[in-house]
Image (tube, rainbow, N blue to C red):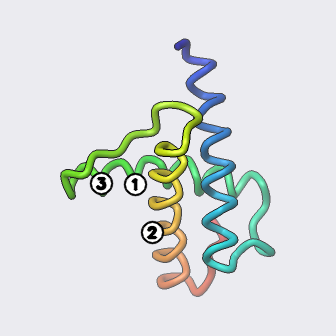
């Protein structure tokens, strides 16, 4: 897989995971598509790191359910932290 394909995959998975997390955390009305993508991409990194620390293992390896779940988990953590520290989930 090339660099461009990898970036496209991260953007697609990030958009899906970020949108799902914003719906679950009640921030859907205050987030744009770009913010959903950023939350999902950072969520993929956070989710992968946290799941690795728990020895569960998690990686975003393509457009598939396990990758979306890892990014969704991390995006939930990110939005929770943002809401707790800032009173809002806006980036």
Query: Which of the 4 quarters of the picture holds residue 39?
Result: bottom right
Residue at image mark 1: 47
Which residue lies at the image location 55% right of the left edge and 12% below the top edge? 2
Check disc 1 and report its element: helix, strand or loop. Answer: helix
Q: Nearer the viewer, mark 3 or mark 2?
A: 3
Please tell me whether mark 2 sits on a helix, a strand or a loop. Answer: helix
Whole-angstrom CA distance, mark 3 to mark 1, is: 6 Å
Whether label 3 touches label 1, CB < 8 Å: yes
Residue that carries the numbered disc 2 in the rendered image: 77
**Residue highlighted by disc 3:** 51
Q: Is residue 47 above or below residue 66?
A: below
Labelled pair 3, 2 in contact (Cβ < 8 Å): no
- The residue at 60%/28% (across/down) is 7
Q: Where residue 59 appears, x then y in whole percent?
A: 39, 40
Q: Which element carries disc 3, helix, strand or loop?
A: helix
Q: Quadrant of the C terminus?
A: bottom right
Other-residue count near label 2 (Cα within 10 Å), few / some / many at <14 / 14–19 / ≥20: some
The structure residue drawn at horizontal position 48% and vertical position 66%, both measured from the top left corner, is 78
Mark with earlier residue (1, 2): 1
Q: Is residue 62 above or below residue 82?
A: above
Q: CA distance from mark 3 to mark 2?
A: 12 Å
**In the rendered structure, which disc, 3 or 2, sits on the residue that comes first in sequence?**
3
Q: Residue at x 79, y 60 (%)?
A: 32
Q: Against 3, is 33 above or below?
A: below
Give me the disc on residue 10: none
């Amino acid at each position: 897989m090339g660099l461009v394909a990898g970036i496209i995959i991260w953007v697609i998975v990030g958009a899906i995971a970020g949108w799902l997390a914003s719906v679950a955390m009640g921030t859907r009305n205050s987030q744009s598509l770009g913010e959903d993508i950023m939350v999902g991409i950072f969520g993929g990194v956070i989710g992968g790191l946290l799941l690795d620390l728990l020895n569960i293992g998690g990686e975003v390896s393509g457009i598939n359910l396990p990758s979306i779940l890892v990014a969704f988990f991390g995006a939930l953590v990110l939005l929770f932290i943002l809401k707790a520290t800032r009173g809002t989930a806006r980036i």
